[in-house]
Image: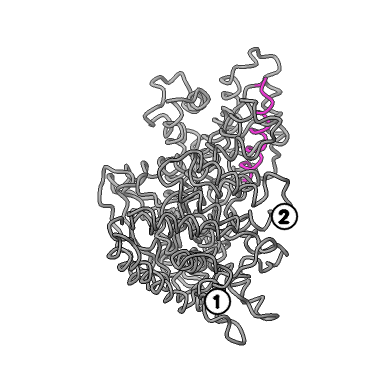
């Protein structure tokens, strides 16, 4: 990004401030940084802001923060009031940002945009919330207007309202709009500028076809009407912004050589307001490109997801490619999404993590990098935060992989909790998903929420159960909306879960386990897994038998699990199904350490065989196999070469004792040790995968 932005803006800031050649020459792409939560999108905007604020006309808009309720006016979100919309909110913030004082630049007055924004902000007199919004917005816009720097928004709105004292129709916005437009033009525009603005708005496609109606008043009426009339109004306002910038840039902004372009940073344009604003912006640029004109605004935006479906005609570049000349040219003149340049932010590599960890005075744990990479899959936020806390903690004591998520952060909370808070900021959703992450699918999650987490006294009330199940559906939609259900090529795939993202799943399960001792009965670790074990035993769907055993193992009852798997091995001839069950059962999370002693490696090596003297050779072998897989499947445990090798030994032993599955078990004996050491999941099963 430090290579791309200077060429787009025309100004290099590191290592020193100097003008550089701009590219491309005319039509500019919207640069869209794409990725999941925590991949560094906002961090890229932070770096751009640090480099360019105060050096070029600059604006930054957090679209996820739009639509917040007005504290003074009541609970209605801004974007539900008829005198605003998400696009107008974005336009206001861009205009205010770009008009801030910058050495070497004269502030842009926005002769087209401002009268349009004033007009649509008109309010209905009987609606206090609308008037409060108008007062606040006009107060922010007045410093941009000619002669408006010393005015107060409340005084301006009151002066207009005083002229309405004798007029009827509290719900009539046309009267207010007429006075607002007239007041703006008289106080903040010359006669020539007023005529130019009026002519410009009258030339827009949705303008009235009669001279008797002021085009700005009609603009306001269409805006307040909403529905199909709203998009053309927003399109007009976006066009006003771009043409104002184009006029200014070809005038005083270019009076010396090639003046750097203005910069707008838009965070979270996947939101409703962000998608609408980009749609209007891209449409205007598509039209302008056909006529050979262009605006100077450099737009760097972030998008949750990959944006491929919404912007199918966008060009896609890898981040590393941006260090070379962009050579961007619109490939389609009739597709608005052709004006987008998608840049997916890549995950950290294992080498990146090693570099982050090698900031200690002495070498750390030999496989800490491997554990962090398997845990995070290179997730930038997760990987960098874990490396930071590991390096900080290493100054006082050795850091082991199993302690990783419990290391303290600067604010004193364990880093696992810190990451969950960052990735799931909404407390109710976070708390709910901690429990639901233990469930395999929606049906299991609904049963857990509707029956397992409600008291016996209210379980019979259908309304309570239905409400809890509705929360599960909402949680599922939240995960989909926030892109937590899209596969990311994570190298360490967990068992099927209601929460499918490997990193988020591991963090939520860890927090559920850590919080278990302080939870009320019914929400503790043992209660949750016991309920899910019984649920899958009753349901009896495909895969439920292994899932019930998995929850039994999560309760710490490994002897019972191995006994049942031994019966499966000897009584059924389906070796692939047996192996699939074993590998699934061994993905169980371990119980809280306060309630369970971790002896998985000792058991896997046969050091504790004396405890199972009454069991047969097959059951003891399965016991060693399951404990080895259980340990190696734990994302917070470093792989041990001997344990990986022993998997092959046990599978070889079992292959000689199965009635019909020698070939399948032999194949697993060859492939599973290597897959375990390299962290590849799930383990391959011949005849099944």
Q: Which residues are magenta?
A: 125-143
Quadrant of the drawing holding the C terminus: bottom left
Image location of residue 124, percent across then percent down: 62, 22
User: How far apart are the two marked residues, 2 and 1, measured between alpha carbons?
Assistant: 31 Å
The residue furthest bottom is 362
Q: State whether residue 602 is above or below residue 109.
A: below
The residue furthest front is 614
Looking at the rendering, which quadrant does residue 189 occupy? top right
The answer to whether any part of residue 304 appears in the image is no
Q: State whether residue 127 is above or below residue 567.
A: above
Q: Name the residue that disc number 1 marks.
A: 607
Was residue 127 drawn as part of the magenta stretch in this picture? yes
State whether the magenta stretch is mostly helix, strand or loop.
helix
Secondary structure at numbered mark 1? loop
Secondary structure at numbered mark 2? helix
Disc 1 crowd rating (10 Å Cα; few below 14, some 14-19, many 20+) is: few
Q: Nearer the viewer, mark 2 or mark 1?
A: 1
């Amino acid at each position: 990004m430090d290579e791309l932005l200077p060429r787009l803006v025309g100004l290099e800031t590191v290592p020193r401030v100097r003008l550089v050649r701009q590219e491309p020459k005319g039509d500019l792409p919207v640069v869209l940084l794409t990725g999941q939560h925590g991949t560094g999108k906002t961090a890229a905007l932070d770096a751009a802001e640090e480099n360019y604020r105060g050096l070029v006309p600059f604006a930054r808009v957090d679209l996820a923060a739009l639509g917040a309720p007005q504290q003074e006016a009541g609970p209605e979100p801004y974007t539900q009031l008829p005198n605003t919309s998400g696009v107008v909110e974005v336009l206001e913030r861009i205009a205010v940002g770009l008009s801030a004082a910058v050495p070497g630049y004269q502030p842009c007055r926005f002769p087209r945009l401002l009268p349009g924004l004033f007009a649509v902000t008109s309010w209905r007199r009987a609606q206090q919330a609308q008037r409060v919004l108008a007062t606040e917005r006009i107060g922010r816009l007045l410093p941009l207007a000619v002669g408006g720097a010393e005015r107060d928004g409340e005084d301006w709105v009151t002066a207009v309202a005083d002229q309405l004292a004798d007029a009827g129709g509290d719900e009539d916005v046309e009267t207010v709009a007429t006075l607002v437009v007239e007041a703006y033009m008289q106080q903040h525009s010359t006669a020539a500028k007023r005529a130019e603005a009026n002519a410009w708005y009258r030339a827009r496609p949705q303008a009235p076809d009669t001279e008797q109606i002021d085009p700005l008043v009609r603009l306001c009426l269409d805006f307040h009407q909403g529905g199909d009339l709203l998009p053309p109004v927003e399109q007009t306002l976006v066009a006003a912004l771009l043409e104002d910038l184009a006029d200014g840039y070809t005038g005083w902004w270019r009076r010396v050589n090639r003046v750097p372009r203005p910069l707008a940073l838009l965070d979270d344009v996947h939101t409703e307001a962000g998608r609408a604003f980009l749609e209007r912006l891209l449409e205007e640029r598509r039209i302008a490109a056909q006529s050979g004109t262009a605006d100077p605004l450099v737009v760097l935006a972030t998008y949750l997801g990959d944006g491929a479906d919404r912007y199918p005609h966008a060009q896609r570049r890898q981040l590393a490619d941006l260090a070379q000349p962009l050579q961007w040219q619109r490939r389609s003149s009739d597709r608005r999404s052709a004006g987008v340049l998608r840049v997916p932010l890549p995950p950290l590599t294992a080498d990146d993590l090693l570099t982050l960890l090698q900031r200690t005075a002495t070498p750390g744990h030999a496989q800490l990098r491997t554990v962090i990479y398997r845990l995070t899959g290179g997730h930038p936020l997760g990987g960098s935060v874990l490396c930071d806390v590991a390096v900080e903690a290493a100054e006082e004591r050795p850091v082991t992989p199993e302690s990783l998520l419990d290391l303290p952060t600067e604010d004193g909370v364990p880093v696992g909790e810190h990451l969950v808070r960052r990735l799931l900021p909404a407390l109710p959703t976070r708390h709910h998903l901690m429990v639901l992450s233990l469930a395999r699918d929606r049906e299991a999650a609904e049963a857990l929420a509707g029956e397992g987490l409600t008291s016996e006294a209210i379980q019979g009330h259908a309304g309570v159960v239905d409400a809890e199940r509705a929360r599960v559906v909402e949680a599922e939609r939240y995960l989909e909306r926030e892109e937590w259900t899209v596969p990311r090529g994570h190298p360490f795939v967990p068992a099927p879960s209601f929460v499918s993202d490997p990193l988020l799943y591991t963090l939520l399960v860890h927090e559920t386990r850590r919080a278990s001792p302080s939870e009320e009965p019914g929400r503790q670790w043992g209660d949750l897994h016991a309920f899910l074990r019984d649920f899958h035993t009753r349901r009896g769907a495909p895969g439920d038998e292994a899932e019930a055993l998995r929850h039994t193992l999560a309760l710490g009852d490994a002897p019972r699990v191995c006994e049942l798997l031994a019966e499966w091995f000897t009584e059924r001839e389906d070796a692939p199904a047996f192996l699939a069950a074993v590998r699934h059962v061994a993905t169980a999370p371990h119980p809280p350490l306060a309630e369970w002693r971790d002896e998985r490696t000792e058991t896997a090596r046969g050091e504790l065989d004396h405890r199972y003297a009454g069991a047969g050779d097959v059951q003891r072998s399965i016991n060693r196999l399951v404990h080895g897989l259980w340990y190696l499947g734990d994302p917070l445990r470093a792989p041990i070469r001997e344990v990986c090798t022993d998997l092959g030994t046990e599978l070889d032993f079992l292959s000689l004792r199965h009635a019909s599955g020698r070939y399948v078990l032999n194949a697993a004996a060859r492939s599973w040790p290597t897959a375990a050491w390299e962290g590849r999941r799930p383990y391959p099963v011949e005849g099944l995968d």
